[in-house]
Amino acid sequence: MKKLYTNYLASFSGLSKEIWFLALVTFINRAGTMILPFLSRYLNENLEFSLEDVGIILSFFGIGSLVGHYVGGKLTDKIGFYNVMMRSLLTTGFLFIGLQFVTTFWALCISIFFIMSIADMFRPAMFVSLKAYSKPENQTRSLALVRLAINLGFIFGPMVGGLLIIKSGYETLFWIDGITCILATILFVLLVKKKPLYSEEEKKEKEVLDKKFRIFNDTPYLIFLAISFLMGMLFMQLFFTMPTYHFKQFGLSEDYTGFLLLLNGVIIVILEMPLVHWIENKKFSHTKLFAYSSFLMGLSFALLLFDSFAEMLIIHMVIMTIAEMIAFPFTNTFAMNRAKKGQEGTYMAWYSISFSFAHILCPVVSFKIIEYFGYATNWGITAIYGFIAMLLSVLLYRMLKKSPKFKLAKNNIDS
């Protein structure tokens, strides 16, 4: 037991103080974002929009996120990650406070699009900041720590938000969302000192590369984006189709859905950092990790074809969570290490955009399949996404092994 405890603490060692501060800021921001899990109910019950209108309004959430990732990546390359993170956080805080006063259909569509466009500029900039504040060997664990903060916020935020809705209504949540964004901005400025990503010599090298290279010439990275998109199509099922499936197939309430999402968060909080630390020490190829993860994700949905008992949902969630921990921290590292100097923001933007496309397409495609063919067909097709992603991961591994032109540092991407 003492050895396990020592190994667990060791998984957190060596990270810079800036990374710990970034994790704190991320936790405050994520825990404070309480309205989002309840936004569909707020629109339907308080503002009395139809479910069809609610679906349209929320689609602007995904579209705005996509635009925010793209613009945030471009701005990160132009003005630096620090400025983008600070301005995104601060502006989002005031926009969330103002959202409570928007009540008409098209005004909500435009407002949510605008808010998410600003809010998700933060994400590619944050990914780039990990490179600035981390040693190369600690980059993946730095992301894992930030993911831990996100999951702690994911556990804490909705729980407190639900209690506040019962006690004082939805309006309180808009104020808390906004104030916590502003508080996170203040802490970010006070605790995290601005740091350039490049030296003056590297900036000159970057300018030369800017003229010679474009992201769409990087074939392995395009394959990686396809893998990320397919993983996103699998992962988003947890938030879109699984809650309705819990009720339709087993008659389970929202509490059970909440329990399963809580289980996901708790497993990640407890196990992800030690798992990432162990994987890094073993020096597994990242592309092999993507293959293992994709297979497990596909398998978890294939198991839902045998859904004669509700406990299968727990087995499904555990396997999905393990798959998530194996791959997601390392997809960020792959994307960052693949990026050319001066194009980190663009690379991380397209990495985020691959998930945004999944966020937009998953509910549309999956609910259409469910409507016409049922849940079993959707689970079968979703499992196929996983197996295709696995095959693409194997292809990417072989491409990087065979082509020195595309191969990065040994033990960084592939070995």
Image (cartoon, grey):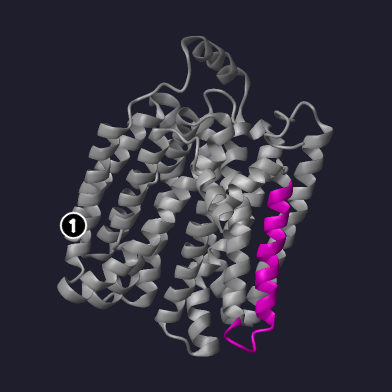
Which residue is depicted at the point 25% across and 41% down?
90
- Which residue has dot 1 on it? 175
Foreground residue among 105 and 216: 216
- Residue 142, x across and y down, in percent: 49, 40
Mark 1, secondary structure of its residue: helix
Foreground residue among 376 and 102: 376
Is 142 on the left-hand or right-hand side of 114?
A: right
From where the camera sits, is residue 234 visible? no
Whether residue 409 is situated above or below residue 67 in the rendered picture: above
Which residue is depicted at the point 72% across and 56% down?
292
Disc 1 residue crowd, few under 14, some 14–19, many 20+, Cα 10 Å: many
From where the camera sits, is residue 224 visible? yes
Which residue is depicted at the point 26% across and 78% down?
45
Which residue is depicted at the point 40% across and 80% down?
255
Query: What's drawn in magenta, residue-wise?
Result: 288-311
Foreground residue among 52 and 293: 293
Q: Residue furthest front?
A: 2
